[in-house]
Amino acid sequence: MPLKPTTTYATISQINGPLVTIQNVKNPTYGEIVNVLLPDGTKRTGKILETLEDKAVVQIFEGTEKLDVLNSKVELTGELMKIGVAKHMLGRVFDGQGRPIDGGPEIIPECYLDVEGASINPCRRVYPKQMIQSGISCIDVMASIARGQKIPLFSGSGLPHNEIAAQICRQARLVQVSPKNDAGNENPENFAIVFAGMGLTHETARFFQNNFTQSGAIQRTVLFLNTSNSPTIERIMTPRLALTTAEYLAFTHNYHILVILSDMTQYCDAVRQISIQKQELPGRKSYPGYLYTDLASIYERAGRILQYNWFLGVETSEGVKQIGQVNTVNYKIAGMQKTNLNDLYEMEKGKKVQIKDAGINPEVAPKETKDCTPQLIAQIDSAPQNYTFVLYPKENQKSGSITQIPILTLPNDDISHTIPDLTGYITEGQVFVSRKLCNSGIYPGLDPLPSLSRLMKSAIGEGMSRKDHQDVSNQLYYCYAYAQEVQNIKQIVGEDAIGADDKIYLNFLSEFEQKFLTQGQFENRSIFESLDVAWGILRMFPERLLQRMSNEVLKEFYQPK
């Protein structure tokens, strides 16, 4: 392995909390990882947060205690922060810096990836489709989550968002339409969870770890747990480590990944804290003006990407012979499979060989593609003429997806606060935890009226959930909203003054909250069971009042009590 040069400076000029200012630095790079060497020989790690001419501001991960301005040294590594990723990270627990804390062995990386992630070509994004089942009726029926969607959970202090997050991790899976085949013709086992906890108390961190271990969900989960006593900069890196791991599992191993980030309010407070220490101009509620961009750099790392499997081919009279396969994202080669490519390069010594890109949509697509045989390699090797190899694309229809559920605790239950306000601009809906419902003894206490999934229409319906799904959702929304209006009128005029139809809505209100919205913490309902529960409640209405449903759906599913 080639040695990489490093530069060491003994020019620390200032220490301010976890920030260290270095002077007379040549060519510092934003985001560069540095090593801080203390006089006693210990080493700490930091990251360059700001550069100005020959100065650099470094955030120390382990804090600046015992750091000596005169005798400490800073070593610039020339590397950005990377994480070693591997498929066998599933089932493991890491701290906020990506170090194992479950007592298991160190991870043997399959590759190292930049924690900031690779830019995604917008033209290669695929519209989120098909549904992820959470096992919670209110979410699955009325705010369905599409694969590749980003939808936050808005909660408040003291509400059961940790229990809801753990329940989703235990129960979430791809929708199984039939016993043999799911909605996407994919292996239902290629689904996994990446959970990132930020600013957690030790009690909450133990809760998640024990919950996943006891339920067996840990086997398909990667946990990153940042506790409240950890350095502030670690809290900022934790979601990026989790998302980099998710991207590797999704786009290299074709997993459908559900990423749960809790609590983004703690993350934003860490961004504000560092901004204040850097003496930046504050924005709304002292948060930095770039908070929107910072949040977008996390939330936008979700979705589905159209990938291609590329292969090197040589045209022959029999068609196109495949020489070797190349995996790529965003038109650029990201890695090569060790198929016949090594043999090809050995064979090419002393020859002038041109490799030409056929483009995403080649004008002349190969009519026939065959694997390269040893006889063909020998034929090419002995031929006197030079060959032109063409890089042909093949669409990969089995690429994975990343779905995000960031969890926010609303300060003072204020949905107009800066954090949920900016989050709402970036994400595609929200699921709302109601304090009123929770105080009434209803778990999980999700309120469907302020909840919304903007991509729900592309995730449900025949072949993905059930043909009556959209109609049932529309009817439940209408009935619940109208029933609450009737409840308010009843409190003013009394029950005797309302009509017979309105009394049915009052009965619906009670049944809906007790049978549909109320669900046990370990009660896992499939989407089909949830729809059946909804129909069991809706059948209290005469058919004439179910005006949000089509005649076809009513004819097939409506059976009056």
Image: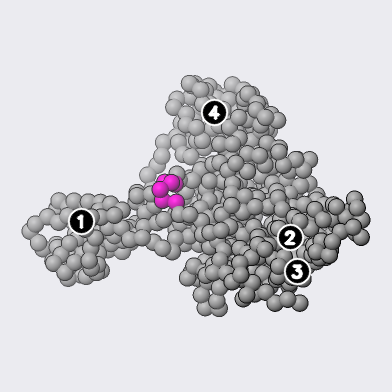
Circle 1 sits in a helix, a strand or a loop, which is it? strand
Res 541 label: 3
* Sequence-earlier tag: 2 or 1: 1
Circle 2 sits in a helix, a strand or a loop, which is it? helix
Mark 4 vs mark 3: in front: 3
Q: What residue range appears in magenta?
A: 120-125
* Sequence-earlier tag: 3 or 2: 2
Q: Residue at x 22, y 52 (%)?
A: 355
Circle 3 sits in a helix, a strand or a loop, which is it? loop
Q: Which of these two is toward me, 559 or 335?
A: 559
**Disc 4 versus disc 1: distance between alpha carbons?**
46 Å
Res 50 label: 4
Marks 3 & 2, CB-CB < 8 Å contact = yes
Q: Taking 113 as reference, is 217 left or right?
A: right
Spot occupied by residue 557 in the image (x, y as percentages of width and height): 64, 75
- The relative height of residue 497 versus residue 232 in the rendered view (above or below) is below
Q: Mark 4 Cα within 10 Å, few/some/many (few <14, many 20+)?
A: some
The residue identified by callout 2 is 479
* Sequence-earlier tag: 2 or 4: 4
Q: Residue at x 47, y 62 (%)?
A: 254
**Disc 2 versus disc 1: distance between alpha carbons?**
64 Å
Could you tell me the amino acid type at mark 2?
Cys
Q: Mark 2 Cα within 10 Å, few/some/many (few <14, many 20+)?
A: many
Q: Mark 3 Cα within 10 Å, few/some/many (few <14, many 20+)?
A: some
The residue identified by callout 1 is 389
